[in-house]
Image (cartoon, rainbow, N blue to C red):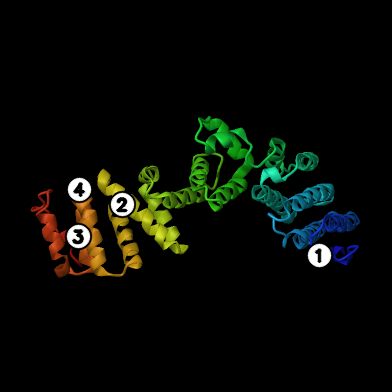
Amino acid sequence: MAESVEPEQDWMDRALDTADDTLVAMETLLATLRAFEDVLRQQELSIASSTEYCDNFCQALMHYAGSRNSMEHGLPLLEVYCLSISCFAAARSHLTPDSDRVALVLKRLALSCFELLLSVPENEIPYEAWVQFHHSVQIAHDTLLQYGSTDLQALLQITGEGGAWSNSVLTSLLTGQPTNPEEVNAYISLEGEGFMEMRVKHLEKMGEVAKAVVLAKACTECRFISNQATFRQTFVFLLCHLLPNEEAIMEISRLDCKDVLEITCTLESEGEENHAFILCTTFLTQQLQQQNLYCSWELTLLWSKLQRRIDPSLMSLVERCLQLGAIAKTVLHLLCLVRIIQTEVSPIGCFPFLCWVLAGPFGCKNIRLDIFTHE
């Protein structure tokens, strides 16, 4: 069994403090992975043997790379992934496609490698290292392609371009230059949802929220992305970070009300109450100003719930309703606010607001208010 394979030395605890340590650790890691492959070759092709190899492969890689900081050990870790990709590709002919672990390990290997490329500044990776890494990925990709796997395709293109941010379409998109929608879709399709999610998160982490918004929006508009809902939520969430930016407000106002309701509820359930409230308030304000009545009651009700959660004071709720009422341009929106106060405060407490509505610029004296009474 593969568990009986003994590494030449205890490489798991070896630190990457010196170049010699790095070289020795790489040699022992290579010996360990090859030992796993030797055991695999001696076994019949099966789900059990493939799963065992994948588990041992991941454990070895995690012990070596899991505790290393990408900023401090960027180049050594790049060499580790280069070695690991080559070893996994070499063992592929002895792995059955019936094991889910095979595809999963390869996908995670590509994502982990890409995450490293995002974390390490490109100018810290020597040209020779880029060439070597690209060559290794090319060989591994050609091997895996024989088994129908294209998991390394995006990684191959990135290494061939010389950096994680060197793609011309991506550069044009993030810098606001004119782009061809078909080229953008083709680029997003090539890298896939996993790489795109990591790019957006990395941009947000680095404080490049505006660029993250642009990329997330492009993903929501790409017909090749199956999970557009996730990118749409990320896009809206990031827009909230840009408020009160005028462009962000306009982007939010163009959203569908049902999408806003769904995303707001999702943010609330995930503990992002402040962002949920900001989103809901911004969209409701725009809806009032644009006289948009679509889902107006549902939106107003959700806003009131978030308002009470952010600030339980009834007086604050009434004041906010008055502020919103001052910019409302339709009778229905005003009556929604009346209903909120009537429900939360009481008919008596609602009386001043009702008087304000009835005496307002809409001439509401003939409006039936019984539709808003309690059952």
Task: Determine contact: label 2, label 3, CB under 8 Å.
Answer: no
Element assignment for label 2: helix
Q: Quadrant of residue 29?
A: bottom right
Question: For the residue labelled by badge 4, is the local secondary structure a helix, a strand or a loop?
Answer: loop
Q: Indicate left or right for 168 with 302 as reference.
A: right
Residue 33: percent from left, percent from top: 85, 56
Sequence-wise, which precedes: disc 4 or disc 1?
1
Residue ID for mark 3:
338
Indicate the amino acid at tag 2. Leu
Dot 4 and dot 2 residues touching (CB under 8 Å): no
Mark 2 or mark 3: name the one nearer the start of the chain.
2
> Residues under labels 4 and 1: Cα distance?
69 Å
Residue 148 at x, y percent in the picture: 74, 42
Question: What's under tag 4, amino acid-wise?
Answer: Thr
| Amino acid of disc 1 | Met
Q: Which mark is residue 284?
A: 2
Crowding at dot 2, Cα within 10 Å, few <14 / some 14-19 / many 20+, comes out as many
Image coordinates for residue 20, horizontal then vertical, percent: 86, 56
Give the quarter of the image for residue 146.
top right
Mark number, residue 330: 4
Amino acid carrying mark 3 in the image: Val
Mark 1 or mark 3: whose residue is earlier in sequence? 1
Decide if residue 190 is in sight here.
yes
**Considering the numbered disc 3 on the image, is that residue within a helix, a strand or a loop?**
helix
In-front residue for pair 132/263: 132
Residue marked by disc 1: 12
Report the quarter where the N terminus lies: bottom right
